[in-house]
Image (tube, grey):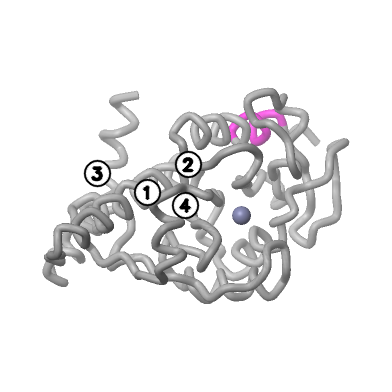
Amino acid sequence: MNYENERNIVLNACREMVKGNLTVGSWGNISIKCHDGNIAITPSGTNYEKSKPEDMVITDINGSVIEGKLAPSSERLMHYAIYKKRPDVNAIVHTHSVYSSVLSVTDDKIPPITEDTAMILGNGVNVSEYAITGTQELADKVVKGLDTNNATIMKNHGAVTVGSDMERAVIAAQVLEKSAHIFILAKLCGKVNVLPEKDVKELRNMSEGYLNQWKNWK
Ligand SMILES: [Zn+2]
């Protein structure tokens, strides 16, 4: 089976994650659901700037390696648990970005504060409960925290975003980090005004149009 396309998509998203300062070193990991239902996922503990497409590991949805010389990400159980629970999800981005991580430490949910937060992240972002990295317990807690949304902050750890494709999962990661940054600064200023609920719904419905415009700008 040829997974060249999916491997390239995962590696390019990794480079975007590093370039956008959404993670440092090899922390953070990314996966995509392939055309045949298998998963292309980042390898464990490698430098994404130096990685090649063939370093991305192909596994089935239970973690058995189908193709690849390297070990799949140590946080892979979380990816499989999300795909099993959410058939609408085809790509997952897990970051250790700074401002989302601050909220993971203070255990603060992000409310819908700006139009891009509402469009891309809906009615705010929950903080999932803590469990140690790489465990099924953490995977289950992240699935619960994510619920039907496309982002969750992972308590004392980082963040996860998902999408129907990689572009949407990466944009969600970028908007999440920007929203976390704004929320923290607003709290430091001593006042946080939240968007009205009816406007959040309307903005959410407008998001697909904006995402299509985004594609045209690239
Ligand atoms: Zn992590």
Residue under numbered circle 2: 22
Image mark for residue 177: 1
**Total numbered badges shown on the rendered structure:** 4
Q: Secondary structure at mark 4?
A: strand
Residue under numbered circle 4: 163
| Residue located 31% across and 47% down the image | 178
Could you say which quadrant of the image residue 152 lies in? Answer: bottom left
Between marks 4 and 1 in the image, the one whose residue lies nearer the viewer: 1
Mark before the other along the chain sequence, 4 or 2:
2
In this picture, which residue range is highlighted in magenta? 4-9
From the image, give the main secondary structure of the stretch colored magenta. helix
Closer-to-camera residue (142/181): 181
The image position of residue 39, as x and y in percent, is: 70, 49
Q: CA distance from mark 4 to mark 1?
A: 16 Å
Amino acid carrying mark 1 in the image: Glu
The image position of residue 188, as x and y in percent, is: 21, 59
Residue under numbered circle 3: 209
* 209 within the magenta span: no
Mark before the other along the chain sequence, 4 or 3:
4
Between marks 4 and 2 in the image, the one whose residue lies nearer the viewer: 2
